[in-house]
Image (tube, rainbow, N blue to C red):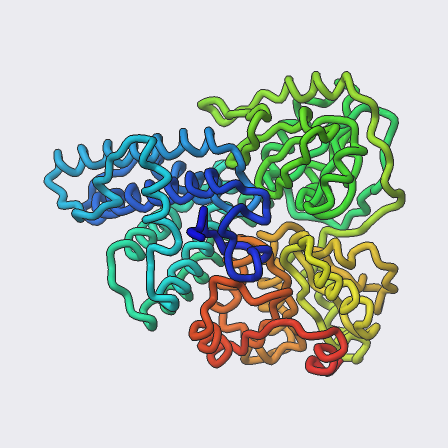
């Protein structure tokens, strides 16, 4: 039977091969086709923008904003609203055609390729999508490296989008994304050349994470060690999911004094670590766990839910919270109100606040507190204590267990692995993977918590800085000489850019799971294994033995 779609960008992809009828994530074939067309429009736009920049012709920042948004929109679990995606496709073609006129005016030659000049009616989009989707590249290994790069660019675009929302941009990063999209489309790159692009993308990913780290810390202060409440209060509430801290700040400002409490969910947990956000007394605590628990957890929250980015799980028909979902930024869900920013970047959250006032307080799921806030600045304050613990052998190993959580049963591996780590081992984490073990009752070692949570997935940059600082403090020549093990879980494309960032820094022997990405071909995997020692999980017992734990 002919494929109705093809997508293999996330860890859940069907049979670890590819979703061909509907996405395991809940994405419908028609929505997948629209995403393929959006990427097609984005590649065409990037080819023209790159040609103009290479001829020293100014390109509007609207192009950068569009490309970041388009890539973010197509990240797993971000946008399920086909109509919204169709609107973005039209915007992309319009921007492309405007740039073509600019090129004509400045006598700039633009490549005569389909992505640049295609025009067709909406009725042709589905057929066209099947021609320009992932399978447009017939060679499996070339396709693998192109998609690995593209997914890294998607993760990078997400980080740039967050930084831009806070007023921080880096033109060289936007130029790189568009140049690379153009090169992947136009150039006949060899396997070796594509591997070089993969590593270069990782290097630019480090730069993007650094930019976002600066944007967050200059806007909200350096994260502090903080106890986050896990219970509820007797006021109506709004639950904020996703990753965008600027949205949370605007909501906190607008809801202050209204009698409505604000709770975080999933990847928004680290918001509580920032001084400028935790000063709001109605930022109560964190509700529930990681993204995939939301069907059950949201049904008990009782109030409206704001998705600031990806991590949407489509609710079942008739779910009691279905009419309480709001989206913003690149997120979208059919029938849910979407909150747009005005020309100054301001968003009006009055509708969600007014809805909250009519709702019952959230039903408590648990009680107690959880501690986090161990980003690089905070860990630097503990550096003498950590070095002393290492030198005394009280701490013998660090295990980086960052990345994503997910629904697959074999992800219980990460809970069991953490449970069975010896007491002289400290876990460094970032991203929602931490929900597999961050509520376990670990004892401290040398007054250092056994789980050091740096924050969101983008805060993996903090883990990188921590490793570099430890290397320098211990006077080691190579980052791979550190007593650090990398056992990283992945799910979507922001985890891909983190992986590429680590590879670009020369980190070797990274252990990823629960599966090797379907988009990594056997030949590409063999090269990654030979060059970087990349491997996947086995059993807890075997991996503890492998890591000499």
Kindly tell me whether residue 461 is visible in this rendering: no
Which residue corresponds to the image point at 63% horizontal and 70% vertical from the top-left? 486
The answer to whether 75 is drawn above or below residue 298 in the figure is below
- Relative to 531, 399 lies left or right: right
Viewer can see residue 105:
yes
Q: Position of residue 168 (x, y in %)?
A: 47, 41
Task: Please name whichever residue, 33 or 397, is drawn nearer the observer in this view of the structure.
Answer: 33
Residue 67 horizontal/vertical position (percent): 39, 41
- Percent across and percent down for residue 240 are 68, 34
**Res 199 → quadrant:** bottom left
Total tally of numbered discs in the picture: 0
Q: Residue 135: x, y in percent?
A: 38, 56
Q: Is residue 207 left or right of residue 41?
A: right
Q: Would you place residue 429 above or below residue 302 in this image? A: below
State the image quarter where residue 509 is shown.
bottom right
Above or below, 57 relative to 342: below
Task: Say which residue appears at 59% left-offset and 46% top-offset.
Answer: 25
Instruction: Look at the image and tell me in which quarter the C terminus lies.
Output: bottom right
The residue depicted at 82 percent of the width and 75 percent of the height is 422
Residue at the farthest left position: 107
Judge left or right: residue 438 versus residue 40: right
């Amino acid at each position: 039977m002919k494929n109705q779609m093809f997508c293999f960008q996330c860890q859940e992809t069907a049979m670890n091969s590819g979703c061909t009828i509907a996405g395991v994530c809940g994405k419908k074939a028609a929505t997948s086709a629209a995403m393929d067309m959006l990427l097609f429009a984005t590649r065409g736009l990037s080819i023209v923008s790159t040609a103009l920049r290479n001829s020293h012709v100014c390109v509007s920042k609207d192009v950068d904003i569009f490309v970041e948004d388009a890539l973010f929109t197509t990240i797993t679990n971000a946008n399920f609203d086909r109509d919204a995606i169709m609107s973005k496709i039209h915007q992309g073609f319009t921007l492309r055609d405007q740039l073509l006129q600019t090129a004509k005016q400045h006598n700039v030659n633009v490549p005569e390729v389909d992505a640049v000049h295609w025009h067709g009616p909406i009725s042709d989009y589905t057929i066209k999508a099947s021609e320009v989707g992932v399978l447009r590249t017939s060679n499996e290994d070339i396709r693998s490296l192109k998609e690995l790069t593209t997914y890294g660019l998607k993760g990078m675009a997400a980080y740039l989008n967050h930084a831009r929302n806070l007023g921080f941009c880096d033109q060289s990063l936007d130029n790189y994304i568009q140049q690379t999209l153009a090169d992947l489309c136009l150039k006949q790159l060899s396997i070796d050349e594509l591997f070089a692009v993969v590593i270069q993308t990782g290097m630019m990913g480090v730069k993007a994470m650094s930019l976002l780290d600066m944007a967050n810390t200059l806007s909200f202060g350096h994260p502090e060690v903080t106890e986050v409440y896990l219970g509820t209060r007797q006021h109506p509430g709004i639950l904020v999911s996703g990753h965008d801290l600027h949205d949370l700040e605007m909501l906190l400002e607008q809801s202050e004094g209204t009698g409505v409490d604000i709770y975080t969910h999933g990847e928004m947990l680290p918001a509580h670590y920032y001084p400028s956000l935790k000063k709001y007394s109605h930022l109560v605590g964190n509700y529930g766990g990681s993204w995939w628990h939301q069907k059950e957890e949201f049904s008990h929250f009782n109030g409206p839910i704001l998705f600031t980015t990806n991590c949407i799980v489509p609710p079942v028909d008739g779910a009691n919270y279905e009419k309480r979902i709001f989206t913003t930024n690149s997120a979208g869900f059919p029938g849910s109100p979407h909150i747009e920013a005005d020309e100054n970047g301001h968003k009006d959250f009055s509708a969600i606040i007014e809805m909250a006032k009519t709702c019952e307080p959230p039903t408590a799921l648990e009680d107690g507190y959880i501690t986090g806030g161990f980003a690089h600045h905070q860990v630097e304050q503990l550096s003498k204590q950590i070095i002393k613990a290492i030198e005394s052998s009280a701490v013998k190993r660090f295990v980086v267990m960052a990345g994503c959580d997910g629904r697959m049963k074999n992800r219980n591996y990460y809970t069991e692995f953490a449970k069975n780590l010896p007491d002289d081992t400290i876990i460094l984490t970032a991203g929602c993977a931490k929900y597999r073990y961050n509520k376990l009752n670990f004892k401290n070692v040398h007054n250092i918590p056994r789980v050091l949570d740096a924050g969101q997935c983008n805060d993996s940059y903090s883990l990188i800085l921590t490793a570099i600082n430890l290397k320098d403090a211990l006077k080691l020549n190579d980052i791979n000489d550190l007593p650090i093990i990398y056992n990283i879980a992945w799910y979507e494309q922001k985890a891909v850019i983190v992986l590429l960032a680590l590879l670009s820094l020369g980190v070797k022997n990274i252990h990823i799971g629960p599966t090797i990405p379907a988009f990594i071909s056997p030949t590409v995997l063999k090269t990654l294994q030979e060059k970087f020692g990349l491997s996947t999980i086995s059993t807890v017992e075997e991996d503890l033995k492998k890591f000499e734990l």
